[in-house]
Amino acid sequence: MPATRRRTLRRAKNVRRPAKVRPAKKRRTASSARTKKFRAPKKLVVPLPRAREGRRLPPGICRLDYPRVRGYIVRLSYRRTRAGWKPRFKAYFGDTRHGGKAKAFAAAQAWLRAVTETGKAPAV
């Protein structure tokens, strides 16, 4: 082998490179925080889903009729999560707990009306 052969230097993968220098962030002082205007949180607007033709129940309310589960479920204002689309507001109104089918439906309608008006879920 010739003695004049050069060795090529390779950069090792596990060697840490120096970090990039970033400019320092400006600190917020108490006086600068006070000068900014206070913004009240916006009221959450919860629109009702569109009604389909030939449907007896109002949009957002579904009837569950299974051997062990009988009642109404209300789902409203869907949001996207990592797992998929999930309702922001959800409540179940059972026939036995509310004293019958008609009373459970009336409770579901009242809850739906309260959520759409206030933007917050009342206690069931």
Image (cartoon, grey):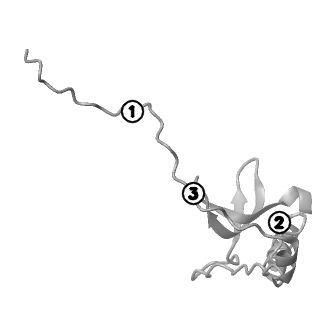
Q: Residue at x 58, y 54 (%)?
A: 82
Q: Is residue 26 above or below residue 36?
A: above
Which one is in front in this view, the residue at disc 1 or the one at disc 2? 1
Q: Of the residues under marks 1 and 3, which one precedes in the sequence?
A: 1
**Label 2 is placed on what type of residue?**
Lys
Q: CA distance from mark 2 to mark 3?
A: 32 Å
The percent coordinates of residue 41 (x first, y second) are: 81, 78
Q: CA distance from mark 1 to mark 3?
A: 38 Å
- Check whether the beta carbons of the residues at disc 2 and disc 3 lie within 8 A of each other: no
Q: Of the residues under marks 1 and 2, which one precedes in the sequence?
A: 1
The percent coordinates of residue 120 (x first, y second) are: 83, 72
Using the rendered view, name the quadrant where residue 96 is placed.
bottom right
Q: Residue at x 57, y 58 (%)?
A: 22
Q: Which mark is residue 13?
A: 1
The secondary element bearing badge 1 is classed as loop
Q: Which mark is residue 84?
A: 3
- Closer to the camera in the image, 62 or 3: 3
Of all residues shown, which one is farthest toward the top? 1
Classed neighbour count for the residue bearing mark 2: other residues with Cα under 10 Å, few (<14), some (14–19), many (≥20):
some
Position of 51 compared to 118: left or right?
left
Q: Is residue 10 above or below residue 93?
A: above
The secondary element bearing badge 2 is classed as helix
Classed neighbour count for the residue bearing mark 1: other residues with Cα under 10 Å, few (<14), some (14–19), many (≥20):
few
- Closer to the camera in the image, 98 or 43: 43
Quadrant assignment for the N terminus: top left
Q: Which mark is residue 101?
A: 2
- Closer to the camera in the image, 32 or 93: 32
In this rendering, does residue 64 appear at all? yes
Q: Residue at x 72, y 78 (%)?
A: 46
